[in-house]
Each structure stands twice: as C-alpha cells, then as structure tokens.
Image (cartoon, helix red, strand yellow):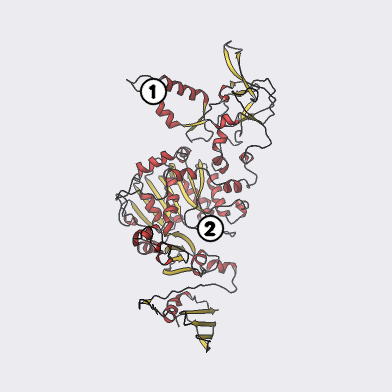
Amino acid sequence: EAAGLTMLSYHCHSLHPAGVSCVGVLLESHISFHTWPDEGVITLDMFTTSSKPLLPALPEIERLFGVPRVNAETGEEEEPVSVWSHELRGFRTDEERRANVYDDNSDLSNWITSPLEVTKKQIVTVKTEIQQIDIWDASEREDLPSYEDGVRLGFGPDDPRWMQHEYASPTRLLFLDGALLAIADSDAEFHESLVHPGMFAHPSPKNVAILGGGDGATLREVLRHRSVEKVTMIEKDAKLVELARVHLPKMCNCSEIVGSTEVCFDDARVELVYQQPKDYFALNNLTDIDFLVLDGTVPETDREVPEHWFNDKKFVDAMIDSLSENGVLATQVGTAPTILDPRADLSVFRHRERFINSLEANPKIKSIFIYEEAHCGFYEPKAFLVACRDVTCRRHWYAETDEIDYAIYDRIGGLKDGKPSLVHYDGATQRSFQAPPRAWETVYCRREPEPFECAYRGLDKNAELFEFDPENEEESSFEIRMSKNKETGEEEVGVYAKVDMPEGSYLMPTHLAASFEVSDDSMENVHANTQIEGVDKATVIEDFIDFIDTHGHPSIQEGSGKNYVEVGGSFMMRISEDPEEANVRRWIPSHPDGGRPKFSPVYDRHRHSFDVFLVASRDIKAGEEVVKPVGLWDI
C-alpha cells in the first residue's frame, strides 16, 4: 500500500535449518524476501515497472521488517540497521534519464541511493516549482570518528572508540535536482576557496552580490569581511533558504562572527531577493558591485544547456557591467581537468570553456585566474575562477604569504571567542592557488589555434646553455673586459663570449634564475625610509636602491607589482639603443597581441622564468660582446 503496488499472488516456504523465503507477483512486477533468524537479517528485493517511486515506501518497509533485537549481554533493544540500494532501471531516453534525479548518472544516485556501503538517512525531500531539493545524512562503513567527534564525546588519547565506526557522525549533503551542491563537513574548505581569494583580490570590497547560495555558506564567508557594507543575495528558490535555516544550521551560522547575527540571512547588511538572477539583472541597472560571486551547480555534459549562465554571453556581459571599476567576479567552475582531457570546447567542460571565452572577449575584464582545491570533499578536486576589471588585482593575487595572512588579520580578524575565523584559507593556501596545476596548461594548449605562449611551456632541451663562472675561467663561457665607450671615451665594463653561441641559446641561466624579486610596495617603503628627516643617511641603503633602479625591471605580468633584479654576471651586459648591435632577447618574446593574455595558465605557471631568462637573439661569435637592447623588458 505504501508503495502504491498491487499484489496478485505470493508463495512462501521454510528454509533449512531456519528462515523463510517468499516471493510475490505484483501487477507492476515482483517482490521477494529471505530471512536469517540466527543472524537477525532479512533481505528484501522489490522490482516495479510503475512510474511511482519506491523511496517513499522505505520508512514503512523499515517499520514492518526492521524488528529490534535484544542484546544478550545488556538486555536492551538494539536499533535495527537498514542497508539499501535504489536503482533506476528500464528503458528510457537520454532526456528522460537526465530529468530523473535517481538516474545512475546523478550525484544523488552515486552518493546516496545506489551505494550499499553508505548508511543514509533522508532528512527532507521537497519538490518546488523550481527544483527538487534533497537533504541527506550519510556515512560509509569505513568512516571513523573525526576530531570533532572525539572532542564532543570526550575521547582520550588511547580511547579505543577512535577506531570504531559507530561513533562517527554522518555528514549532511545538499542536492539540487540530483546534483550535489554542498557537503556540510567540508563546506568551509569549499566556500572559503570560493569567496576569499576573490575578496582579497579587491582592496576593500563594500558592495557584494551573491547569485544563488541559498544554503547560506557563501553569505557566511562574505560577512566575515569587515569592509562589507551591503550584500544582495539573489536566490531563485525561497524554499531552499527556508530549509537551510532548519536543516543546514551550520552552513548559515553567523553567531560567532563579530557584528553579525545568529543566522546569516538575518544580518542587517543582507538583502534577500527571491528572483531568477537573469531577471534581476535585466530589471536593475547595476554598476557598483565590488565583488560578485556565483554559487550554483555547473553543467558537465555533452549536451547544450542554453539556460545556464555559463552559456549566456549577454548575461555574462551584464554581470561584468555590474562591477565597479575595480570589481571582481568569482565562481566555481566544476570539476578540475586532467592531462588526459580533450580540447575543452569538445568535452563535457564545453560550458566552462564557453564562459571563459565570454570573459576573455569582454574588454572590461583585464585578468582571469583559475585555481583548484582538492579538500572540498567531492570525489575530484573542484575548480574556481576569479576575473577582475582592474589589472592591478594581480598585485593582490600574487601577494606573498605574509601579506595575505596580515590582510586576513586586518580585514577579518577572529571570532567572538578569539579563535581564528578561517579554518582553511590563509596565505599559504593562496600561494598554492597562484600557479594552476599542469592539467590546466595542457588543456589550454589544446586550443586551436595553439596559443602563442604554449611554445614556451618548458626550456628548449635542444638549446645549449652557456654559463658564467668567475671562479673557473676555463669552464666559463663568458669573460668580463674593460673597454672605452666610443662616444664618451670612458672606461666601461662589458661581457664577451668566449665561444660561439647559436641563436636561441640560454645565456647565464643559473645567474638569472638567482634574480631576486622585490615588490613595488617594498621599494616604496625603502624609498620613504631614506626620506625621514632627522635620521642619518644610510649610504648602503641608498646604494641598494640605486642598484635596483639600474639593474631591476618590472615583471612582464602587468599590474603584478613585482620587479626582478639581476645579481649575476648578466647585470654587467652593456645596453645599446642600436637594435642591430644587440644580440640578446628575453626568452619569451612579446606576445603578438601585446602584453599577456587575460587568461593563460601558461603565464601563471611560468611567471618567474618568463621574467628572468635571456637567450641569444642571433648567433654570437666567440670574442663578440654580449649586448642587451634598450627596452628589453618592456611590456
């Protein structure tokens, strides 16, 4: 009755030495069960051709067949344990399978309904006018208690319960239309990675907009920033927010954030708008959003999904137009690629590639960063993207570890109880985001035509290396000579080749690799210190500044605020305004389009190499002076 099925007939017989086996013929298919009394086990199989789902009958099945056992030692009743799997079989079109949240291609099936080894409990399932919302508790048989479980239960260091599954708390999972959106146990790792890299790429975000994010976790992370004055959260489904308040309290909990409220949605800085984001942007001429974050599911399929914002260039342009002059956009972009993936526009990641292409094509976007995080709790690492309207956001993105740590201290601070606000993101985490994994570079270079910089993904192994060794003149490929300047008649230092050096050869790579990096901020501080009145002049500092000004050059990564200073033999190479005289160029030539591309995992992965290495621009003969051109490092 609970499943809405009709019994036509059944047959039962006793098993030897104990138990019963029954089979029933249904109007819709059949049902069978077998019992093992000594083990206290009953197995049941139900097959139906009905369009009615079987999951609603599960509580009734557990009530009827889950008979509690009495523990022989304690005399207490033990709670029955149900282990079950739900499989959607039969003949369905691809469209019908995609529309069914229990299809074996869905996250809900892969994480919850299909695996027998997962212990699961349905918290709530609601089908709204917009989507189906599922919230489940789940744990695997091999799961062991977490650190928080041990603290909560008072485990000591040698407590045997650390190795017992029954003391492990289940994790809560949120699914929208069968797609896994959030995992409560690792939501901090995910949402801190989604929000804070982009927030700290902006000098002081005040006006923030969130598209989606109905579970409240993205909002929670945004509200940690003391600079934030207003947050507009545009969520298409009010029911999701309502359910999050009741069933996802940890994710929307702002009670420990200084200046906030118990529930994040109730913070005075927050305006909740229940509307389709596309409709909201169409009706509101927004131009002053400092930080815009997209928090929703990402399509990973070979079929077209025109309704998703990734595929709507007009909407992407509207989001970019809504940003302030130095505004930042952040979003998760799905599963991270592997080096085995085909061209992105020919794979299941075509929607992500189309979104990135839209950002690249918009003249208001100046820089795009891609990064991934493997600690979000999903089966594979999750990828994220940050896009900036101002190229100077590279200065914040490439900040040193201590700079990020101080920015977190200065802008976020601690919780009310004095504990750190963030559990995952810090300066070292940001450092790991600055260079995307190699798979991003590999897939990017499968674009057609191949991007210019892909020819410089690694040093040319066929090219020769010529080193300068002042302590071993016989082994050194260079020598230092004094000569008279033809124009001034003054003595000057020059670097000369001792051997023939073919075009494309690497010149002094070991010395150049030792070039040190100094930021614009550091230089400004050093300059300022020399101008303080009443302080004795520090000649060594002034000489240091002069050396940097003479032998340093800005990074070719425009807006990064980085400078590189040569400290080896290369800084003694003469600089000439005559292009015919110069025989040195930087390893990667200027990009044909000028500057560097807005989006390029190649440039992000090889920043230091591109900023320091030099090669012979033509064949250099033994005895010939090695000469740099003026503007060698100009962007």
Considering only vertical position in the picture, is 34 above or below 190? below
Q: Quadrant of residue 410?
A: top left
Distance from disc 1 to disc 2, alpha carbons, whole Å, reads: 56 Å
User: Residue 616, located in which quarter of the rendered image?
Assistant: top right
* Above or below, comparing residue 286 to residue 481 in the picture: below
Instruction: Determine which residue is flagged by label 1.
Output: 530
Considering only order in the chain, which callout, 2 or 1, is on the residue closer to the N terminus?
2
Give the foreground label among 1 and 2.
1
Residue marked by disc 2: 299
Q: Is residue 218 above or below residue 82?
A: above
The N terminus, quarter of image: bottom left
Task: Locate residue 6, reporting x and y percent.
Answer: 50, 85
| Residue at 44% across, 81% down | 65
Query: Can residue 136 be seen by looking at this rendering?
Result: no
Query: Residue 520's spot in the image, x, y percent?
Result: 45, 31
SS class, disc 1? helix
Q: Are marks 1 and 2 in contact (CB under 8 Å)?
A: no
* In this rendering, position of residue 149 left or right of residue 87: left
Q: Say which of 211 and 511 sits in front.
A: 511
Q: Position of residue 545 (x, y in %)?
A: 45, 23
Residue drawn 60% across and 36% down?
Answer: 591
Q: On residue 370, which mark appears?
A: none
Measured as percent of width and height from the top left, residue 49 is found at 55, 79
Q: Nearer the viewer, residue 530 or 292?
A: 530
Q: Circle 1: is it few (<14), some (14-19), or many (20+) Cα within 10 Å?
A: some
